[in-house]
Image: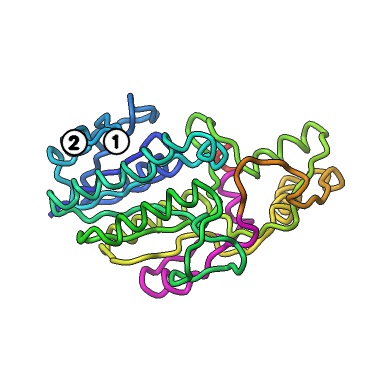
């Protein structure tokens, strides 16, 4: 019996990694969806449906027609500052869209895996377990917290995969990340300022895809922290990147977050405790150094 899995946001970084992973798994009937045309380089091993998650009727139609066993919902508006300035668009993509997917999941008895974020926390006392109390300090954080509530109180079968600072290489190189930014800056001989007063457990996109798959495969219900395992400041990430590519570390200078003016507040200290996903799912992420190596091999 094949398991049919529908992915939202298949053109995005996590969506791409999930398509790469799930097309290699036997017994998976994969439906990839995103807004507009399929932007993935290969179209083998899955079917593609155009679906705008902010359009309720499209969501109901596509899910009703494909009848997936599991939806992995990766699509979201994730630019934290843009969410602060474009609140209506943020709410439409991050909350109302989730309500439509919940409705479609209820009608079709579908298991919903919803991807969430460390930004639901205020960052006063990370790393966090799954049971920690949320207290968002940005509109993005509030939108993702509201979406979690919609899923938790939905009455359907659900899981939430929370993650932290995802990095990786998209097929079209459309997104940068801290590793690529540090590498390019140092290769160009530029001095960069990197903060020392924020802490994260940065997550390789391939690891996040694996975590989502483990949840989907087992239809494991509840909240799971799916992140990297190394608890680092961006400054430490930059230094590890310079070491890996043998670049000049003297170009990296320490700064604190007050140096940078950003519209949305960032939680200072997040990161996740991974005891539960290790125990329940058998999830084991790569170290940050191993993650850099995976990314470097794709350049």
Percent x, y of residue 24? 32, 47
Q: Is residue 8 found inside the magenta-colored segment of the image?
A: no
What is the quadrant of the C terminus in the image?
Answer: top right
Secondary element under disc 2, as helix, strand or loop, is helix
Q: Is residue 274 found inside the magenta-colored segment of the image?
A: yes
The residue that mark 2 highlights is 62
Report the Cα–Cα distance between label 1 and label 2. 9 Å
Side of 1 relative to 175 (left or right): left
Point out the frontmost of discs 1 and 2.
2
- Residue 73 or 142: which is nearer the viewer? 142
Label 1 or label 2, whichever comes before in sequence order: 1
What residue is rendered at 30% in x and 32% in y? 52
Percent x, y of residue 39? 39, 27
Side of 132 relative to 242 (left or right): left
Q: Which residues are magenta?
A: 267-295
- Callout 2: 10 Å neighbours few (<14), some, many (20+)? some
The residue that mark 1 highlights is 33
Q: Is residue 189 above or below residue 112?
A: above
Percent x, y of residue 119? 52, 54
- Residue 183 or 123: which is nearer the viewer? 123
């Amino acid at each position: 019996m094949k398991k049919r899995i529908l992915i939202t946001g298949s053109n995005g970084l996590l969506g791409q990694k999930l398509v790469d992973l799930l097309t290699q798994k036997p017994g998976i009937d994969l439906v990839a969806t995103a807004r507009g045309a399929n932007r993935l380089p290969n179209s083998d091993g899955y079917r593609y449906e155009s679906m705008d998650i902010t359009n309720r009727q499209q969501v109901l139609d596509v899910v009703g027609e494909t009848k997936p066993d599991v939806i992995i919902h990766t699509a979201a508006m994730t630019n934290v500052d843009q969410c602060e300035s474009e609140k209506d668009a943020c709410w439409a993509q991050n909350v109302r869209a989730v309500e439509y997917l919940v409705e479609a999941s209820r009608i079709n008895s579908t298991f919903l895996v919803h991807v969430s974020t460390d930004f639901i926390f205020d960052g006063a006392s990370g790393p966090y377990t799954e049971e920690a109390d949320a207290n968002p300090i940005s509109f993005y954080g509030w939108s993702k917290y509201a979406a979690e509530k919609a899923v938790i109180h939905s009455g359907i079968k659900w899981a939430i995969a929370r993650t932290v600072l995802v990095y990786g290489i998209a097929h079209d190189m459309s997104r940068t990340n801290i590793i690529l930014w540090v590498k390019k800056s140092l290769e160009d001989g530029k001095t960069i300022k990197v903060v020392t007063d924020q802490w994260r457990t940065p997550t390789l996109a391939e690891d996040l895809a694996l975590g989502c798959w483990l949840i989907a495969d087992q239809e494991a219900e509840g909240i799971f922290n799916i992140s990297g395992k190394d608890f680092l400041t961006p400054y430490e990430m930059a230094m590890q990147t310079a070491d890996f590519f043998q670049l000049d570390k003297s170009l990296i200078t320490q700064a604190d977050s007050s140096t940078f003016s950003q519209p949305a507040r960032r939680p200072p200290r997040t990161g996740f405790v991974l005891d539960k996903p290790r125990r329940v799912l058998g999830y084991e992420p790569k170290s940050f150094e191993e993650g850099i190596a995976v990314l470097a091999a794709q350049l």
